[in-house]
C-alpha cells in the first residue's frame, strides 16, 4: 500500500539540507561506530574491509542526502527497491532495520546540538525514518513472496554439485537446487552465507554476493569466486568447502540487465579482474548489435575466464604480465577503448584531438558519448577512476556494478 509523508516534514527536511550536508560525514561515521558497539548482531551484514576503509560511512552520508531529496517519490523509487533487494538477499529483517533507526535517531540528535535547530526538524526526521522503514519492510515482504514462487524465500542449504578451477585463484561453484529450474534473470547475484573459522573475531556468519554465472532455465546455480588474500569468505569457499558439502544460498536477487533506462542504447562493457563475471552476463543479455566494445584488464590471459567468449573485433584486452607488469592507467584505458570504438562499425564514438596526460583526455566530441551506455565492473577504486574519466568527457550513462546500491 502506497504511503505518504506530510508536506510539513518534507519542507522541514529540505530546509535543513545544507545543515545535513555539512554534518552528514560526522553523523555517518558515528552511526556505524554505535552500530558495532550497541547492535553487534548487525555486524553480519557489514563488510569488515568496507568498514575499516570508511567506505560505508561515505556511502551512508550520500544515502542520507539522496533519500531526503527524493522523499516525495520514495514509494516507487528504484534505489529503494535495489536496497530492499540487497536487504532481502542478506537476510535483513524488520527488527534489524528498527534497531538501526533508533541508533540513527540518537546519533542525529547528538550531532545537531545547535541552538537554532528546532524540534520540528527532529520530528520531521522521525516521521521520515518511520515512513522509509514501513515502505522498506513492505517491499522486502513483497520480494519474499515473489521468491517463494521463483524457488524459495530466505537462505536454503544447497550442496556443491561441482567445484572446478577456471583460472589462477578462481573456482566455479555449481549448486544443485531443490526444484528446477529456479526463476531468475541475467545480471542478478546469488548470496552465500557461511560460518567460517576465521570470522569469529568479527561475526560468526558471513554473507557475500556473487554474480550468477549459470543460464536462466538451467538446472542449478553457479558462480565464480576469486580467492582474495584478505577475503574471509573467498578463502573459505576456496580452501574448505568441498563438493558434496552444503552451504546456505539465497535465490538470485538484484535488478536484471540491461537497465530499463539504457536497454535500447549501444553499450561499452569494461571489466577488471573477477568483474568479468558480471560483464559476461551483461553481454549475453544484449543483442550483438548493441555491444560496441568489451574491454578487460587483468594480470594475464589465464586470469580471464571469458577471454575467448567475445568476437575478436569487439574485444579489447590488456594484460600487465605482457607489458612489463605495468598497470594500465584508467585514463589510458578510456582513451584506447574510445579510440577502438571510434573505428568500430557504425562510428559508435566520435573523438577529436584526444590527448592523454596526467589530467586524462583533454578534448572529445561528446555527442555520441551521451548516447552510449558504459557498464563497469571490477575493484571499487578502479571503477571510480574509470567512471570519473568517462563523466569528465561527458558520458551520461555510466553504471558501476556494486551488487547493490551506488550513490
Image (spheres, rainbow, N blue to C red):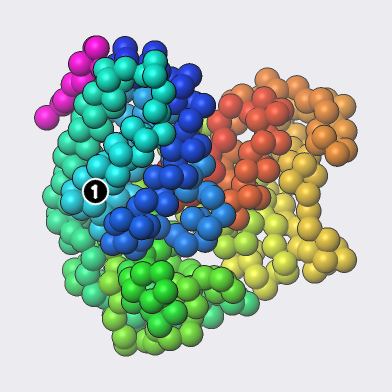
Residue in view at x 29 percent, y 36 percent: 105
Q: Is residue 184 left or right of residue 238?
A: left
Q: Is residue 400 visible?
A: yes
Residue tagged by mark 1? 99
- Front residue of 338/206: it is 206
**Residue at image point 87% right, 27% down:** 353
Q: Determine the residue positioned at 19% across, 68% down.
A: 179
Residue 5, horizontal then vertical, whole percent: 21, 20
Within the magenta stretch, is there residue 75? no
> Alpha-carbon neighbours of circle 1 within 10 Å: few (<14), some, or many (≥20)?
some
Q: Is residue 167 left or right of residue 88?
A: right
Q: Is residue 6 magenta?
A: yes
Q: In this rendered view, identify the residue nearer to me: 214 or 23.
A: 23
Q: Is disc 1 placed on a helix, strand or loop?
A: helix
**Picture quadrant of residue 246:** bottom left
For this rendering, which residue is in front, 258 or 191? 191
Start-end of magenta stretch: 1-9
Amino acid at each position: 500500500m502506497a504511503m505518504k509523508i506530510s508536506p510539513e516534514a518534507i519542507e522541514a527536511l529540505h530546509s535543513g539540507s545544507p545543515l545535513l550536508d555539512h554534518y552528514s560525514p560526522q553523523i555517518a561515521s558515528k552511526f556505524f561506530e554505535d552500530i558495532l558497539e550497541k547492535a553487534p548482531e548487525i555486524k553480519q551484514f557489514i563488510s569488515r574491509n568496507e568498514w575499516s576503509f570508511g567506505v560505508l560511512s561515505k556511502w551512508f552520508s550520500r544515502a542520507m542526502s539522496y533519500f531526503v531529496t527524493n522523499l516525495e517519490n520514495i514509494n516507487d523509487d528504484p534505489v529503494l527497491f535495489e536496497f530492499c533487494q540487497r536487504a532481502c538477499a542478506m537476510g535483513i529483517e524488520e527488527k534489524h532495520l528498527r534497531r538501526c533507526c533508533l541508533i540513527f535517531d540518537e546519533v542525529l540528535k547528538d550531532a545537531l546540538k545547535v541552538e537554532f535547530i528546532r524540534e520540528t526538524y527532529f520530528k520531521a526526521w522521525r516521521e521520515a525514518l518511520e515512513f522509509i522503514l514501513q515502505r522498506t519492510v513492505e517491499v522486502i515482504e513483497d520480494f519474499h513472496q515473489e521468491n517463494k514462487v521463483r524457488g524459495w524465500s530466505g537462505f536454503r542449504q544447497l550442496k556443491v554439485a561441482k567445484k572446478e578451477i577456471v583460472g589462477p585463484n578462481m573456482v566455479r561453484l555449481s549448486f544443485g537446487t531443490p526444484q528446477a529450474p529456479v526463476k531468475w534473470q541475467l545480471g542478478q547475484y546469488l548470496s552465500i552465507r557461511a560460518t567460517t573459522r576465521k570470522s569469529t573475531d568479527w561475526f560468526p556468519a558471513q554473507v557475500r554476493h556473487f554474480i550468477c554465472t549459470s543460464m536462466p532455465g538451467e538446472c542449478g546455480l553457479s558462480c565464480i569466486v576469486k580467492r582474495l588474500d584478505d577475503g574471509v569468505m573467498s578463502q573459505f569457499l576456496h580452501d574448505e568447502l568441498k563438493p558434496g558439502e552444503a552451504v546456505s544460498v539465497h535465490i538470485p536477487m538484484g535488478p536484471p540487465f540491461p537497465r530499463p533506462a539504457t536497454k535500447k542504447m549501444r553499450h561499452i562493457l569494461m571489466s577488471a579482474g573477477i568483474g568479468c563475471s558480471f560483464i559476461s552476463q551483461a553481454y549475453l543479455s544484449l543483442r550483438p548489435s548493441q555491444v560496441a566494445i568489451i574491454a578487460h584488464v587483468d594480470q594475464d590471459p589465464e586470469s580471464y575466464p571469458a577471454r575467448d567468449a567475445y568476437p575478436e573485433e569487439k574485444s579489447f584486452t590488456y594484460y600487465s604480465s605482457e607489458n612489463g607488469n605495468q598497470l594500465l592507467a584508467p585514463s589510458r584505458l578510456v582513451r584506447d577503448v574510445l579510440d577502438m570504438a571510434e573505428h568500430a562499425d557504425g562510428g559508435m564514438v566520435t573523438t577529436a584531438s584526444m590527448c592523454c596526460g596526467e589530467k586524462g583526455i583533454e578534448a572529445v566530441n561528446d555527442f555520441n558519448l551521451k548516447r552510449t551506455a558504459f557498464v563497469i565492473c571490477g575493484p571499487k577504486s578502479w571503477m571510480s577512476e574509470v567512471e570519473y574519466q568517462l563523466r569528465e568527457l561527458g558520458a551520461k550513462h555510466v553504471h558501476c556494478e556494486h551488487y547493490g546500491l551506488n550513490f
